[in-house]
């Protein structure tokens, strides 16, 4: 299942991702590691959706995230790089949201680092395109 295609959706996904990442940083500062990881996952997914919307005109909105990783592979070299970071973030999602163990500071720091790297890739490769209009 894939979602729509317009500039509004792209900007909305980018805004949501940025918000999630900013709040993840606050959660980390307050040592709320499970929340920080969960928010970093949401940030990464929304950044990936924004990238897919901008590059191929659609994003995955199914229950699993494998479809998103497949679409990222089709969205150019930046998408492949985003996919690598997103896959690592997603590998900690179950621990943060469902498992009977807690995420560690290291888990949270690594997920935030990867989500931030995805944001950097988005800003580096997509947003400059906006300023040329």
Image (cartoon, rainbow, N blue to C red):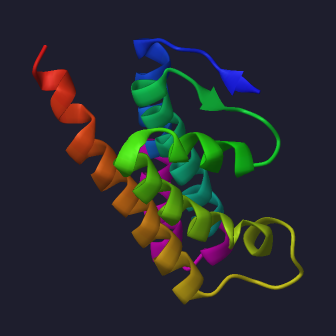
Which residue is nearer to you in this view: 35 or 62? 62
- The stretch of residues the image draws in magenta is 18-35
Above or below residue 34? Residue 62 is: above
Q: Position of residue 71 (x, y in %)?
A: 59, 39
Q: Position of residue 27 (x, y in %)?
A: 53, 67
Q: Is 45 placed left or right of 7 in the picture?
A: right
Residue 65 visible in image: no
Q: Is 63 placed left or right of 29 in the picture?
A: right
Which residue is nearer to you in this view: 14 or 88? 88
Kindly indicate the quadrant of the structure image that contains residue 122.
top left
Which residue is nearer to you in this view: 57 or 10? 57
Quadrant where the C terminus is found in the figure: top left
Residue 7 painted magenta = no
Q: Is 87 placed left or right of 115 in the picture?
A: right
> Image point 68% across, 82% down: which residue?
103
Above or below residue 29? Residue 4 is: above
> Image point 47% across, 43% down: which residue?
47
Residue 25 painted magenta = yes
């Amino acid at each position: 299942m894939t979602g729509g295609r317009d500039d509004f959706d792209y900007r909305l996904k980018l805004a949501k991702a940025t918000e999630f990442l900013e709040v993840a940083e606050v959660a980390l500062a307050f040592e709320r590691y499970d929340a920080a990881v969960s928010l970093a996952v949401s940030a990464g997914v929304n950044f990936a959706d924004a990238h897919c919307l901008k590059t191929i005109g659609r994003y995955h909105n199914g229950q699993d995230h494998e479809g998103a990783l497949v679409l990222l592979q089709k969205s150019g070299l930046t998408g492949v790089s985003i996919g690598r970071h997103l896959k690592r973030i997603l590998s900690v999602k179950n621990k943060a949201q469902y498992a009977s163990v807690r995420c560690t500071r290291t888990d949270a720091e690594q997920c935030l680092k990867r989500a931030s790297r995805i944001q950097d890739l988005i800003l580096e490769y997509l947003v400059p395109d906006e300023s040329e209009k």
